[in-house]
Image (cartoon, rainbow, N blue to C red):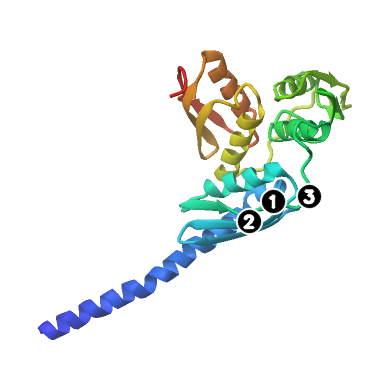
Amino acid sequence: MKASYFVSLLIAAAVLVMSMPVQASDLDNRIESSARQSYVFKTYLQGDDITVQSRDGDVVLTGTVSEESHLTLAEDTVAGLPGVVSVENRLQIQNDSPAKNSDAWLATKVKTALLFHQNVSALTEVSARDGIVTLRGEADSQAQKDLTTEYAKDVEGVRYVKNEMTLSAASGTPRTMGEKIDDASITAQVKMTLLFHRSTSAVNTKVETSHGVVTLTGRAGSMAEKELATKLVSDTKGVRDVNNLMTIGPPE
C-alpha cells in the first residue's frame, strides 16, 4: 500500500516537472505574439527589424530601428505586456541619428511629440530652422490647428511656431472612433508623450493602463503641472479616461 502511494507521488511530481517548461513556453509565446500584434509594433515600428525573445518572462529585444525614439517605444510597450518580468533592450539604430540640437533633431522631436495625440492630424508636416518650427498640412478644424501649435510650443528647444496648416474641406466633421488600442501600447504612448513635452518631461510619473483607463501616480511640482499631465494623457490615442493620483510637492 505504502509502495503504491510513493509511486503515485513520484508520478505526480514527474508530471508537474514535465509540465512546467510547457507552461513557460506558452507564456513566452504569448508575450512574443502580443508584442508583434500590439498597436505600437504594427503602427509605429512596422518598418523596423525587431526580434522579441522571451524566456520565463525575461525579454530580450534585438535588431534595428530607424529612429532613436523607437528604442524607448519598443521597450516600454513590451514592458507593459502581461507576464513580462524584465526587458533587456539590445536594439540598434539603423540610420545615423541627427546631431543633438540640430534642425533635423528638433523637427523629429516635435513630430514625435505630436504623433501620439488623437486630436492632432497624423499628416502634420514639421520642419525646423534655428529653433523656429513650421507646421504644414491640413487640420480638421481651427481648434485642432490651435492645439497643434500649443503642443509644438511645449517641446524643449522650440523658440517659436509658425503654423501654416490649412483647414480641410471637411472642417467641422465629427470625429469617428478609431481602432481599439491595447493597454501596453497606450502606456508606451503616454510615457513618450509626457517625456517629449517640456512641461512634463521632468515629472516623476508612473503610468498604468487597464482597459483604456490610465492611472497616473508619482509627484508633480504644482497643480498646473498635474492638470497639464491629465490634459496631455487624455489626448493620447486609445485613452478612454485618466485617473490622476499624483501628489503635489518637490521631488523626493
Q: Amino acid at mark 1?
A: Lys
Secondary structure type for disc 3: loop
Name the residue beneath numbered marker 3.
95
Name the residue beneath numbered marker 2.
36
Name the residue beneath numbered marker 1.
42
Q: Amino acid at mark 2?
A: Arg
**In screen coordinates, is 148 left or right of 192?**
right
Could you tell me residue 59's position as x and y percent? 53, 56
| Residue 13 placement: quadrant | bottom left
Mark in the foreground, 1 or 3: 3
In front here: 214 or 74?
A: 74
Could you tell me residue 164's position as x and y percent? 88, 22
For the point 56% across and 39% down, the residue is: 187
* Mark 1–mark 3 distance (CA, rounded to whole Å): 20 Å
Query: Compared with residue 9, is residue 236 higher up or lower down, i.e. above or below?
Result: above
Could you tell me residue 176's position as x and y percent? 72, 34
Q: Are marks 1 and 2 in contact (CB under 8 Å)?
A: yes
Query: Compared with residue 54, is residue 12 higher up or lower down, i.e. above or below?
Result: below
Quarter of the image for the N terminus: give it. bottom left
Q: Residues within 10 Å of mark 2 (few under 14, many from 20)?
A: some
Secondary structure type for disc 2: helix
Secondary structure type for disc 1: helix
